[in-house]
Amino acid sequence: MKITEQVAQFAQPIVEANGCSLWDVEYVREGSERFLRLYIEKEGGVDISDCEAIHRAMDPVLDEKDPIAESYYFEVCSAGLERALKRPGDFARFMGAAVTVKLYRPRNGLKEIPGILRGYDDGRVTVEAGKETITFEKSEVALVRLRVEF
C-alpha cells in the first residue's frame, strides 16, 4: 500500500473528528525536501485553527505509525477553492461547475481551457467552452481544477 493510502486511512477519522473531511493526501519531493500534506475541507471553509487542530492530533499518530522512513515536513492545508479534481467522485460532485482543463500539448493554441464540467468517463473529460462542447481524452489532460469566477 502506498504511503498516501496508509496515511489517508488513519488520518480520515482524525480529520472527521475535527469537523472536516479529507480531500487528499500528498507525499512529494520539492528540491531536496520531502513534504507530507493533508488537504482538508469543510462546509463554510477551512481556517487556520482547523489546520492547527488536525496537525496537533496527527503528530503523535504519525510518530507511532511511522509510515515514512526518511525525514519530511508535515503540513495540513485547505483543499482550496481552485482544487484539482482527481477521483471519479470529485468529478461527479462538481458536475456543472466552472473548471480549467490543463493540457499536456496545446489544442488550438491553448494549453488551458476554461469551461463548465459536463461529463467524466474513465478519464475522458467533457466541458462546455462557450458555445462548443469539447471532450478531452485521458492522455491529453494534465490536470482539471475548479475555477473561481468573481
Image: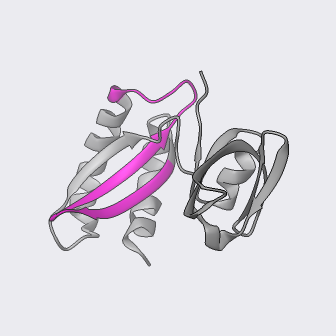
Q: Position of residue 31 (x, y in %)?
A: 19, 62
Q: Position of residue 147 (x, y in %)?
A: 59, 37
Provide the major secondary structure of the magenta segment: strand
Q: Residue at x 50, y 48 (%)?
A: 22
| Camera-nearest residue between 103 and 33 | 103
Q: Position of residue 74 (x, y in %)?
A: 25, 52
| Camera-nearest residue between 25 and 126 | 126
Q: Is residue 4 magenta?
A: no
Q: Position of residue 103 (x, y in %)?
A: 58, 60
Q: Is residue 7 above or below residue 77?
A: below
Exactly how many numbered labels are in the figure? Answer: 0
Q: Residue at x 83, y 51 (%)?
A: 133
Which residue in the rendered view is the most extreme toward the bottom?
Answer: 1
Position of 148 with respect to 123 (left or right) is: left
Q: Residue at x 39, y 62 (%)?
A: 7
Position of 60 with respect to 89 (left or right) is: left
Q: Which quadrant of the figure has residue 119? A: bottom right
Q: Residue at x 54, y 50 (%)?
A: 84
Position of 120 with respect to 100 (left or right) is: right
For the C terminus, give its image quadrant: top right
Q: Is residue 26 magenta?
A: yes
Position of 53 with respect to 90 (left or right) is: left
Colour scheme of this structure image? one colour
| Camera-nearest residue between 77 and 52 | 77
Which residue in the rendered view is the most extreme toward the front?
Answer: 109
Q: Is residue 39 above or below residue 123?
A: above
Q: Is residue 150 above or below residue 69?
A: above
Magenta region: which residues? 23-49
Q: Which quadrant of the figure has residue 35? A: bottom left
For the N terminus, give its image quadrant: bottom left
